[in-house]
Amino acid sequence: MHKVQYFRTGALHAIVARLGFFALLFTFPPLILGQQRPSVARLIQQFEGEKFFWRQFEIAKAITAANDPSVLPRLEPWLTHNDRHLRGNAAFIFARLGDRRGFDVIVTILSDRSETRQVHSISSNGDPSVKGQIREDRYYAAHLLGDLKDARAIPILVPLLADPDVNYIVPWSLGQIGDRSAVPPLIATLGDRNPSMRVLAIKALTELKATEALPHLRLLLNDQARCNFDKLESVAEAAQAAITALQPKTAP
């Protein structure tokens, strides 16, 4: 599910963003396996010229892989870009290269509900939706915190398990960060009224190898409510898969 994240296509984006779709649908051409890696200077030019945020993020990852903090001064204006998705991509570079401003900018986007912003989100009646854009920008920021794998994000993300604008991406981000302090709140989320949240919590607990969740997972083996993404699996099916993955393997 979350290996393919989300893209912006009007009203469809408002639905797909809830399910966390995005990156693998659009791989940036110069980064395809077998092609020569571009220079950092060329990557910066590509980053600055790319308008589609999902492709720009792929370039951002390539820039950070070069581990060259000298690129940061040139990218400073992007930290205040009116498009929060592009701003977040730049902040990702700063954070990955050790500049605290990057993490702070992403966290600020996550809490930012101001209506002064670039709007791409389209409402069901075809008009631009500021509220929809706020949701999408915050959702993307929560996603970026998972991409960063920075444990400082745990106490920021955990309360958002109850935020209907971003809660679908939070378990994935907690699982990606990999800090076991997220295990207790994820176990608590197994009791969420939304079956999709229960399934997402199960998957995150599996990612975190949380064997202490096994007794709680066994209690869900009769839960036939289904999630609303991917294969529409039931909570029971997700719980059984997690139990199989987490329980100690016995010798034959």
Image (cartoon, rainbow, N blue to C red):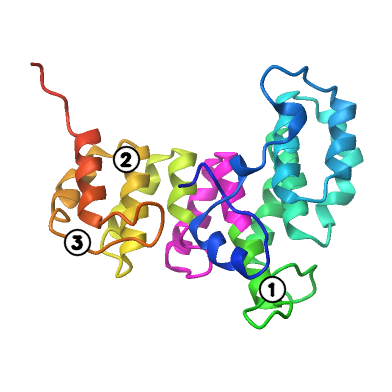
Q: Which residue shows up at 49% across the image and 46% down it?
A: 2
**Mark 3 Cα within 10 Å, few/some/many (few <14, many 20+)?**
few
Q: If you read the primary sequence from the N terminus, does the residue marked by circle 2 or circle 3 appear first?
A: 2
- What is the magenta segment's predominant secondary structure? helix
Position of residue 144 measured from the top left corner of the image (x, y, whole percent): 61, 48
Q: Nearer the viewer, residue 189 or 196?
A: 196
Q: Quadrant of residue 64?
A: top right
Q: CA distance from mark 2 to mark 3?
A: 19 Å
Residue 218 sits inside the magenta stretch: no
Question: Closer to the camera: disc 1 or disc 2?
Answer: 1
Which residue is rendered at x = 72% and y = 55% of the image?
A: 85
- The numbered mark at residue 206 is 2
Q: In x, y percent, where is residue 207?
A: 37, 38
Q: Which residues are magenta?
A: 140-168
Residue contact at pointers 1 and 3, CB within 8 angstroms: no
Determine contact: label 1, label 2, CB under 8 Å: no
Q: State the residue in front, 252 or 230.
A: 230
Q: Which residue is mark 1?
A: 122
Which mark lies nearer to you, 2 or 3? Answer: 3
**Kind of residue at badge 3:** Gln
Q: Secondary structure at mark 2?
A: helix
Q: Is residue 77 above or below residue 83?
A: above
Q: Residues within 10 Å of mark 1 (few under 14, many from 20)?
A: many
Task: Report the side of 51 relative to 148 (left or right).
Answer: right
Task: Tell me, for residue 76, which label it has, or none.
Answer: none
Q: Secondary structure at mark 1?
A: loop
* Residue identifier under label 3: 224
- For the residues labelled 1 and 3, the Cα–Cα distance comes to 34 Å
Instruction: Classify mark 2: residues with Cα within 10 Å, few (<14), some (14-19) or many (20+).
Output: many
Q: Residue 19: image x %, image y %?
A: 49, 58
Q: Residue at (79%, 70%) from the top-left corner? A: 117
Q: Compute the Cα span from label 1 to label 2.
A: 35 Å
